[in-house]
């Protein structure tokens, strides 16, 4: 379990992280979201003792990171996959990690296998690695000590579609076995699928947090429905007669009520529907709405 | 772009873009030499050392009651800057490799030798700037010396000055050449200091011990070959020594290094 | 990570079965880091090759010119390559973690930063001692060859004080580099500082001492190179040791202390 309490980090007069508190539960994947420069990486760096906090503290499983003996065996960290010596081979990088943690060399082969780096690739120097290969190596390094807590900064960065799917399964599996997973990402679609809890941060401050359902329930567009019928005009008239606001949207209609009401109306009038779904905009809309005043681009 | 119709086989219209002018490359390289903390501090330390050296010299000669000329003040500063100017030459080249910015630089200007030429030009500009500073600070120190210690002596050998200009530039270029050869800061610095501070002693030792080496030494010892430059009174043999040893220590490493860079995969 | 652990709020990490990373393991990993990159390996190879080259040149010169040398002469001439490259090794040991940003990984696997620095320190001393052993072996071979080739009488004039002084000299060279590196955390700056300190500064101190009377008296107390002089010919007196201690404090202990304090506080990027 990761517990962040009143964490603040200032650089001069600039506050990168501003009084942030949250908890990452074991058995769950927590997604950490926010626009560029929101303070995600800084928060994660404080967690593992690389950046001293200005105030506040972070405990992992009840301990300060500094107080965890052999922390690699408990906490897997991936902050920046390219922060490795460019002149070392991938295998050697894992070798150093394994030796520091006191693990057998067989563990290195297991991890290389897990992240699908071939023996030939593992003998290349990091300088000659592709972006995704570096990322895979970083993930292998984080998992080396079989930790029960994972702190991953944009782990999907540079991974191919198969790699992203693999990682999704991997992290879900970790959480299901009781592990704690905190990951930051900009791939909202990924986070939406994988994360059980979400923390949204903008300008160093938390703007929303909670499980996915409750967050999305409060989002814009909830309570609206997209519907397409064989005869849109007939459906539109029927809905309007019941007093619902109807507007045309694409091939079909957008109705300001829950899908169940629309379905009921269609059934009453024996109208054939080809598509019926809630018009929540998903995580992307929620994200853009909550962080709108902290976004760089003005969202129309 | 808006008026031409895109299509298969449609060539880029290059008629209205001119190649990047050399002057612009030099300006950009000059900017790179001071816009990082490391570069800024190197230049600041060089400037500071000029001040400090001439200040200490002034304090020593005044308290110890010794005679001093304008030329002596400048020479003291020159001794100190000749230690760090080569480091500047080295950093101009290797910072690009250590920080992997070469990727960007060569993408924007694929004519790689021009980039090196621009860097060398910046090195020479900064060398001259250092010399100018040494002259100005020396002037102030000599005025103070005149005020504190009696009449200032404005003796300043012009032949010496030209020699000084050339040797300082050679010192900087020596670092530059080794850096181009090694493309690695640590290796270039170590080799440079050995070449500059250790090798002359070894060559002298070898020359004292072995007769054949004694006759060979002037042709390979670039440091001593530069000695006559201060008097600007080189005879034919001395020109020969200067040119041959200069080819060994400046031209050769530079040529091999640039040849290597032209072929290098930039990562 | 056990499958039976019950997740829930307040679920603490069970640390009872993990022991802290032992120091010997950290030192072994740090030793490995000195040769597992091409740059590091080449530095070690260059040190060995240069030392051997110095000896071969010396041997061929003394044989060809029919000069008289002793075992100690061979040993002290290795000082040239070792005093030059061992400190660079000491510097890169520390600064490469910063320039290559590996400090991020190193310090997240072992947050007790003083231990990492201590491990590097120990590795530095170990390498210096190993270099001295190699130099002793090479000097023995060269001196024996000298006897064979020149026909002169071979002199084995090596006392315990010579060896001890020589070891101390190399270890101190390495540690001075290490201290400068800790202070500056930047390879070029630390290497330049070391080179200036070992090649340029002695001349300046000498000049100052010649010109200024009072400087001549304080020089032994602040010139660490000068204070090490008697170590080479094993003639250290009580006063020499006092000079050695005071100047060593200035050039070794102070930068190391400031540097370590800085590393312990630094934000690792
Ligand atoms: N040492 C520093 N000095 C000044 N500002 C800093 C420093 N370190 C970080 N910052 C600033 O703190 C802010 C937060 O940075 P951080 O890396 O945590 O963002 P992030 O949320 O991870 O962004 P991204 O999504 O782009 O990765 C940024 O504005 C950054 O420039
Ligand atoms: Mg980030």
Image: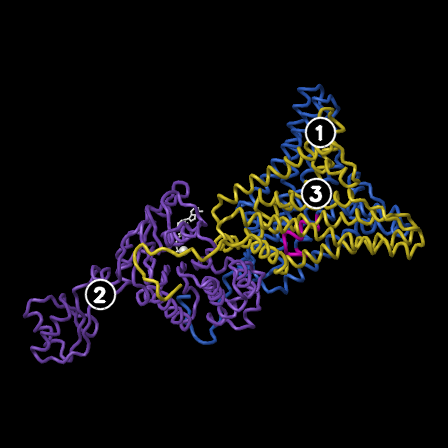
User: Residue C170 at x, y = what percent?
Assistant: 71, 46
User: Residue B120 at x, y = what percent?
Assistant: 64, 51
> What letter labels the chain drawn in blue?
B
Mark 3: few/some/many CA within 10 Å (<14, 14-19, 20+): many
Residue depth check, mark 1 versus mark 2: number of the one nearer the observer: 2
**Quadrant of the image for the C terminus of chain A?**
bottom left
Q: Which residue matches tag 2? A: A280
Is B143 on the left-hand or right-hand side of C269? right
State how far apart marks 3 and 1 are (Cα): 18 Å
Q: Which residue matches tag 1? A: B70
Q: Which residue matches tag 3? A: B168
- Same chain under badges 3 and 1? The reply is yes
**Quadrant of the image for the N terminus of chain A?**
bottom left
Q: Nearer the viewer, residue C160 or C32?
A: C160
Q: Residue at x 61, y 48 (%)?
A: C121
- Same chain under badges 2 and 3? The reply is no
User: Residue C5 at x, y = what percent?
Assistant: 35, 63
Segment tinted magenta in the rendering: B180-192
Verify whether residue B164 appears in magenta.
no
In the rendered image, the vertical position of residue A22 relative to residue A250, given as above or below? above
State how far apart marks 1 and 2 are (Cα): 82 Å
Query: Which residue occupies the extreme left position in the image?
Result: A241
Is there any visible trace of residue A166 in the rendered image? Answer: yes
Q: Quadrant of ligand 2?
A: bottom left
Residue depth check, mark 2 versus mark 3: number of the one nearer the observer: 2
Read off the chain for label 1: B
State how far apart marks 2 and 3 are (Cα): 71 Å
Is C120 on the left-hand or right-hand side of A15? right
> What letter labels the chain drawn in purple?
A
> What letter labels the chain drawn in yellow?
C
């Amino acid at each position: 379990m990761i517990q962040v309490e009143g964490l603040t980090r200032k650089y001069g007069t600039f506050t990168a992280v501003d009084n942030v508190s949250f908890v990452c539960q074991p058995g769950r994947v927590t997604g950490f979201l926010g626009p560029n420069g929101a303070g995600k990486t800084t928060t994660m760096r404080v967690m593992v003792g690389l950046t001293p906090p200005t105030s506040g503290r972070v405990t992992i499983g009840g301990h300060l990171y500094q107080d965890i003996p052999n922390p690699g065996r408990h906490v897997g960290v991936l902050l920046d996959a390219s922060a490795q010596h460019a002149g070392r081979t991938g295998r050697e990088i894992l070798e150093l990690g394994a030796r520091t943690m006191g693990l057998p060399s067989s563990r290195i082969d297991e991890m290389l296998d897990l992240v699908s780096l071939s023996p030939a690739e593992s003998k290349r120097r990091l300088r000659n690695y592709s972006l995704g290969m570096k990322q895979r190596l970083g993930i292998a390094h984080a998992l080396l000590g079989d930790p029960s807590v994972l702190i991953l900064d944009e782990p999907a960065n540079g991974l191919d579609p198969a790699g992203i799917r693999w990682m999704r399964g991997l992290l879900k599996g970790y959480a299901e076995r009781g592990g704690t997973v905190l990951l930051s990402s900009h791939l909202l679609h990924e986070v939406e699928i994988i994360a059980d809890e979400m923390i949204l941060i903008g300008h160093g401050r938390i703007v929303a947090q909670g499980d996915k359902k409750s967050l999305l329930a409060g989002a814009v567009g909830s309570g609206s429905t997209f519907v397409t019928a064989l005869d849109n005009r007939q459906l539109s008239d029927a809905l309007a007669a019941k007093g619902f606001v109807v507007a045309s949207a694409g091939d079909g209609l957008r109705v300001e009520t829950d899908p169940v009401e629309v379905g009921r109306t269609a059934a009453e009038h024996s109208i054939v529907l080809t598509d019926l779904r809630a018009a929540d905009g998903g995580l992307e809309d929620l994200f853009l709405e909550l962080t709108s005043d902290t976004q760089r681009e003005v969202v129309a | 772009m808006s008026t031409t119709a895109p299509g298969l086989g449609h060539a880029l219209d290059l008629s209205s873009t001119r190649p990047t002018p050399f002057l612009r490359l030099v300006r950009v390289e000059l900017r790179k030499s001071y816009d990082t903390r490391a570069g800024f501090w190197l230049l600041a330390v060089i400037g500071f050392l000029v001040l400090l050296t001439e200040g200490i010299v002034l304090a020593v000669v005044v308290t110890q009651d010794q005679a001093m000329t304008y030329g002596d003040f400048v020479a003291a500063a020159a001794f100190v800057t000749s230690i760090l100017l080569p480091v500047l030459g080295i950093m101009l080249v290797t910072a690009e490799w250590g920080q992997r910015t070469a990727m960007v630089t060569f993408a924007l200007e694929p004519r790689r030798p021009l980039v090196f030429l621009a860097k060398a030009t910046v090195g020479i500009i900064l060398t001259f700037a250092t010399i100018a500073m040494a002259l100005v600070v020396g002037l102030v120190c000599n005025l103070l010396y005149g005020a504190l210690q009696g009449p200032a002596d404005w003796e300043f050998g012009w032949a010496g000055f030209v020699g000084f200009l050339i040797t300082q530039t050679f010192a900087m270029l020596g670092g530059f050449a080794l850096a181009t050869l090694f493309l690695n800061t640590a290796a270039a610095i170590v080799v440079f200091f050995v070449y500059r501070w250790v090798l002359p002693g070894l060559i002298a030792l070898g020359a004292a011990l072995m007769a054949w080496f004694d006759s060979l030494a002037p042709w390979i010892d670039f440091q001593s070959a530069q000695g006559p430059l201060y008097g600007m009174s080189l005879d034919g043999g001395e020109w020969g020594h200067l040119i041959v040893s200069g080819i060994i220590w400046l031209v050769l490493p530079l040529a091999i290094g640039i040849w290597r860079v032209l072929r290098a995969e930039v990562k | 990570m056990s499958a039976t652990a019950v997740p829930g709020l307040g679920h603490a990490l069970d640390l009872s079965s993990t022991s802290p990373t032992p120091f010997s393991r950290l030192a072994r990993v740090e030793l490995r880091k000195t040769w597992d990159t091409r740059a590091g390996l080449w530095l070690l190879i260059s040190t060995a090759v240069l030392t051997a080259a110095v000896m071969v040149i010396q041997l061929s010169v003394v044989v060809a010119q029919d000069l008289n040398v002793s075992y100690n002469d061979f040993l002290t001439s290795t000082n040239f390559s070792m005093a030059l490259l061992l400190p660079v090794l000491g510097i890169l040991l520390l600064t490469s973690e910063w320039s290559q940003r590996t400090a991020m990984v190193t310090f997240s696997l072992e947050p007790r930063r003083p231990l990492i620095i201590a491990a590097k320190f120990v590795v530095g001393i170990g390498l210096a001692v190993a270099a001295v052993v190699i130099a002793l072996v090479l000097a023995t071979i060269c001196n024996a060859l000298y006897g064979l080739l020149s026909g002169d009488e071979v002199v084995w004039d090596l006392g315990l004080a010579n060896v001890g002084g020589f070891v101390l000299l190399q270890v101190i060279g390495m540690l001075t580099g290490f201290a400068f590196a800790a202070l500056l955390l930047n390879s070029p700056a630390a290497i330049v500082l070391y080179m200036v300190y070992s090649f340029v500064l002695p001349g300046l101190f000498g000049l100052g001492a010649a010109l200024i009377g009072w400087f001549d008296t304080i020089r032994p107390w602040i010139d660490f190179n000068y204070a090490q002089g008697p170590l080479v010919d094993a003639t250290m007196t009580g006063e020499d040791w006092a000079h050695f201690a005071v100047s060593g404090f200035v050039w070794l202990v102070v930068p190391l202390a400031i540097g370590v304090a800085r590393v312990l506080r630094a934000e690792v990027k």
